[in-house]
Amino acid sequence: MKGLMKGIAVCAVAVLPAAVSAALGDYAPVTDARLKNPEAANWLQYRGNYSGWGYSPLSQITDQNVGKLQLAWAFATGQKEGHQSPPIVNNGYMFVTTPGAQVIALEAKTGKELWRYKKELPGEMLQLHPTNRGVALYGDKVYVATIDAHLVALDAKTGKEVWIKQVGDWKALQYITLAPLAAKGKIMVGSSGGETGVRGFVAAFDAETGNEAWRTYTTAAPGEPGGDTWPGETYKNGGGSIWITGSYDPDTNLAYWGTGNPAPWPTEGRKGDNLYTGATIALDVDTGALKTYFQYNPNDAWDWDEVSAPLLIDTEVKGKKVKAAVHAGRNGYLWVLDRTGQKLNFVDAYPFVNNNTIKSIDPKTGRPTFADEHRPGLGKGDVHFCPSLWGGKDWFPEAYNPKTGLLYVPANNNLCAELPEPEPTKYKKGDLYIGYPIEAILTGLRWAKGAKDAPKTMGEVQAWDLKTGKQVWTHKYPTFNWGPLLTTGGNLVFGGGTNDRMFRAFNASTGKVLWETATPSGVTGVPTSFEVDGEQYIAVQSGWGVDAQRMQGGVDRLLGYQTVVPQGGTVMVYKLTK
Amino acid sequence: MEQRETCARTAQAPIDASRRKIFRIAALGLAAGVGLHGRSALAIEAVPEALRPVVGDRLVEEDAEGEPVPLKLADLRVGKPLLAFPFDTASKKIRSETRMNKVVLLRLPEAELDAETKAVSAGGVLAFSGVCTHMGCDIKTWMVSEKVFACFCHGSKFRPLDHGSVAGGPAPRPLPVLPIKLEGDQLVIAGPFTAPPGFTPQA
């Protein structure tokens, strides 16, 4: 009876601020077991599962009925700039992050705000990439990493700060844009900042206490394996930044992270492979030990960060079973590696966009040979290369559907770039560390060599059959694509990414556009799917900005006009009409 | 029992909510409506008045080493921007404690300046906040073809010949002007920034 009275007291106080909403169950703690085998109804982490698939098994919304998809609710975040984080859902609770170091908890069914956390940012700081790519859920907490290089643990039910740790030095322009990776009691994050002379790292923090467990740098120091790939002390500001959540194989306890370009961009001062930049690295989650790696761009000269973590897919490749790690590279090649045991071995690679830079790939080791005439550098004048600085595919994730067996790649084709002579550059804390004139970078986008007119198409959504290495279908856009992909058990692929503000559904087997809808801004957010009370929903954030806007500036300059994509973030949630 | 559960769910309260937690939840709910969580303020408000430039300050080059040497008109070449900080000649203090004091100087042919711009310039040298009003990056690139300052971070462009007005990109407001004048051959600060320098936070 006493308990009942107490409950009524809760009611009396708590209903004051907001109208009564539909019942929302208790918050279900997120365990290792749930992250390893996520239930279909929820979307518990960045890509839905540890393998990085971007796949929801939910199959209520299908290629047959997706035309009846309509807005269930929308929610304005109050922020401009790039809204890239996936709406992450656990047991009816939705968590989104926005630029401005903000986390919003919403009732997934109705969009009712439950709580909001916003970290105050230092007025002195500058933001090169004003975005955030989402939360991690673990136990009863929500974890967010911030643009001023902090990691924050929040109580999932109240949004109350449980602990906050400084991960990096924002004054040195270390900053964090990724969603943390949660596994085995650890919360892992890494630092962005390849253009600001950071030394990239992945660091793990105890989920309960916030104490740092380990920190592994992505550029090798002298005496370490790979340390001889950097002259002198160049590794100290060598880049290799971490922008995107790692994928994780619980069977081997290895987390796979993509690393960014080496710094500065010109290669003259850093002769060598510059390990472990432009690579996939595999770290032991208990210790942080670097167990293996595969480098896509030795001694990169093109700003080709290879930041998206590989998708872990057990498949067949040309008749042979492979525990694969698959990565659609910024360098324009689709890479298939074998991750059996503690190694990453080359299996195959093939171009998925026009590429004049990779001349050949060693069939045994996978090491690329680059065409010297398309490699920018000292004494070369203007150097033209394809794909562009933003690559065949930038950070926005691919998706894999185990039902169709296809890998879906959001690509940019027919776009190239030009870089002039490098200029002298010296590392200075708190400043950019690039090595090319800013004006040249801002105006560096080009069509294919010799092409006077714009290409008929640029952005693409591609479907690849890993078993054969063949492209199954391609949908082409007149302009570029900056759209992360989701695929579902209903034989669908969802994605936005175009400057017409559209969010689309494709038939996952054929590529046919089955549904599209205009959103308030452009969609560069990671879409997700979840279920509440037996109903399937599709969720995505609309909110153009950051690199999509930069690329638009480059394309507009070549076309001689100005495309306006309105800014401002909105969480969009769709369901079938009855 | 049913009622208790329903009510507890409405509040998103933990099942074992203590009295303190109950009060907090209510307070949070009320606060959400009045925006107490949006604590960011315009960056200039974080700069104590004592740290701000004052009229009569000279300017010194951002990375100059050794004894500070006030910048002279002849130190600036036409079309070559230069980053500087205010310098208090009496105390010999460079006012570089805050990035918000960073100044970008640009010398242009005097004939290109209209009367209003001339009034805040010194021998063809114009001074602006060196911090982009969008996301706070350094402004130090002069695009001669378009006659604009350009920001590397997100491509915002500002017109120095039109009081720092926005010529393109995401910047929401002009680059603040810092009025300067000549005393002898030295560049001297002649007035406060025309608007608070720094990025423009969202609520």
Image (tube, rainbow, N blue to C red):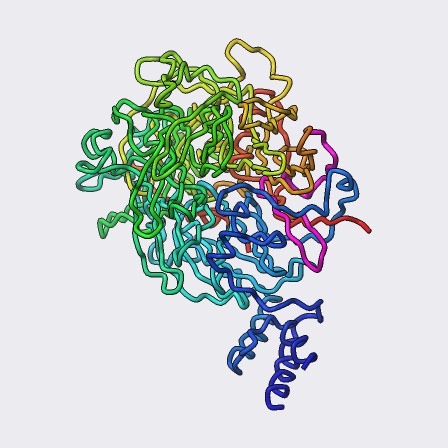
Q: Residue visible at 69% across and 41% down? A: A490
Foreground residue among A62 and B53: A62
**Residue A26 in view:** yes
The number of discs equals 0
Estimate the x, y position of residue A1 in percent, counting from the top left: 63, 90
Image quarter (top left, top right, bottom left or bottom right) of the N terminus of chain B: bottom right
Estimate the x, y position of residue A115 in percent, counting from the top left: 57, 64
Q: In this view, does A110 lie to the left or right of A278?
A: right
Q: Is residue A77 above or below residue A421?
A: below
Was residue B81 drawn as part of the magenta stretch in this picture? no
Estimate the x, y position of residue A200 in percent, counting from the top left: 33, 41
Q: In this view, does A528 lie above or below B108?
A: below
Residue A63 image-quadrant placement = top right
Given the current orientation, which residue lies at the most extreme right position?
A578
Image quarter (top left, top right, bottom left or bottom right) of the C terminus of chain B: bottom right
**Residue B179 in view:** no
Q: In this view, does A228 lie to the left or right of B183?
A: left
Foreground residue among A55 and A102: A55
Q: In this view, does A445 lie to the left or right of A218?
A: right
Given the current orientation, which residue lies at the most extreme top position?
A450
Q: Residue visible at 55% across and 44% down? A: A84
Estimate the x, y position of residue A11 in percent, counting from the top left: 65, 79
Q: Residue visible at 48% across and 48% down? A: B195
What's the magenta region?
A: A511-538
Q: Residue visible at 33% across and 48% down? A: A171
Q: In this view, does A502 lie to the left or right of A191?
A: right
Foreground residue among A239 and A126: A239
